[in-house]
Amino acid sequence: MKKIIGLVAALALVLALGAWAAFRSSPAVQDAVVARAAHAAIARGSQMPAADDSLRVLLCGTSSPMPDRAAAKACTIVVAGGQWVLVDIGPEATENLNRWRLPIARIGTVLLTHFHSDHIGELGEFNMQGWAQGRRDPLQVFGPDGIEQVVGGFNAAYAPDRAYRHAHHDHGKGLMPLAAGEMQARTIAPFKAGEAPQGRRSVVFERDGLVVTAIEVDHRPVTPALAYRFDYKGRSVVITGDTVYYPPLVAAARGADLLVSEGESHALLDIVAGEIAKTGDARLAGVLRDTASYHLTPVQAAKMANEAGVRELVFTHIAPPIPLRPMAVPWLRGVREARPDGVRLGHDGLTATIPLDGGPVRFETLRE
């Protein structure tokens, strides 16, 4: 038996070496391999079905501003009734969408919760990618007071890029119309910069049965800051954005099927800050500790979910990063005691399907 195994192994080695030699020496073999790999990636298509009538949520970025190789910055997609709506678009998130082969050109609406860099940093890139991949109308970007400045800044920064790509790829056939490459800002009233949060709500839009409502939250000194609630045919999801525990948000999330909440373990972040301080960087340590004053802890989010009576709680905007799965244990410390069931730690690619028949929320993970 050992001789047979040895012969099989030797044969496999010879075949592998022969294949490698053929690949290295033959351009035709190299091109065939590239074509096969490209076909496999392109033919795979999107893993996010949109034909059936469900309310779906995809976490396309789950990290905080702290560096995390495994996760992009803040990004969530909601799909309902054939509509694709993007909530926040932080750095690295567009790369995720492309790797998953999502139909970026179908996403014509972006909702921004607030204007911290980890929530808006890739707005220009996402807009360009959707335009290049076939979007025929300007991207509509909704947000509170200040959205005109943010969108105008990205439009200005990308103006040369738009001109270059139009000149190179349009070919006089309207393939990349300039008008479609410039975003349009849409201000959500009545939230004004500098005003203390008052827990107000405002319907952003109603389309084909989907109702999107903006909810004022408390992320001071960031004002205004918003959460969003999506209601579709009796099912609902709430995305908190960044906030502290805030009773008006609890009221606005009442009865939701899914609460996508930020979470920051203040205790673990304080440990990280302490280690940074030991290196002599007291400034950065102080910056990290400051964040505890305007972010939800996992336990606070769990209690908020209980009070709102939501069915499922999923964490995103996770701080500090969880580089190894066992580190989720201290990050979630106290959560199971506060909410024994209906809690899930989010990750890039996690999808939630909320069926309209009242059935349980189903969770899956997109593959690259």
Image: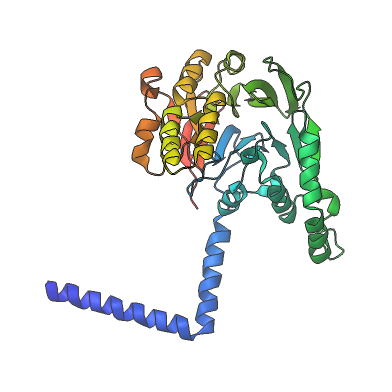
Residue at far front of view:
280
Residue 77, compared with residue 163, is above or below; it is above
- Location of the N terminus by quadrant is bottom left
Residue found 50% across the figure and 19% down from its top: 305
Residue 88, compared with residue 43, is above or below; it is above
Q: Depth check: 345 or 254 in front?
A: 345
Lateral position of residue 179 relative to residue 60, left or right: right
Residue at far right of view:
172
Residue 146, compared with residue 42, is above or below; it is above
> Is there any visible trace of residue 93 in the rendered image?
yes
Lateral position of residue 183 relative to residue 226, left or right: right
Residue 14, compared with residue 277, is above or below; it is below
Q: Position of residue 306 (x, y in %)?
A: 47, 16
Residue found 81% across the figure and 59% down from its top: 175
Residue at far left of view:
1
> Is there any visible trace of residue 311 in the rendered image?
no
Lateral position of residue 200 relative to residue 181, left or right: left
Q: How many marks?
A: 0
Q: Position of residue 141 (x, y in %)?
A: 75, 37
Please identify the quarter of the rendering in which residue 196 is found.
Answer: top right
Model colouring: rainbow
Residue found 81% across the figure and 53% down from its top: 159
Q: Position of residue 238 (x, y in %)?
A: 59, 25
Q: Position of residue 163 (x, y in %)?
A: 83, 59
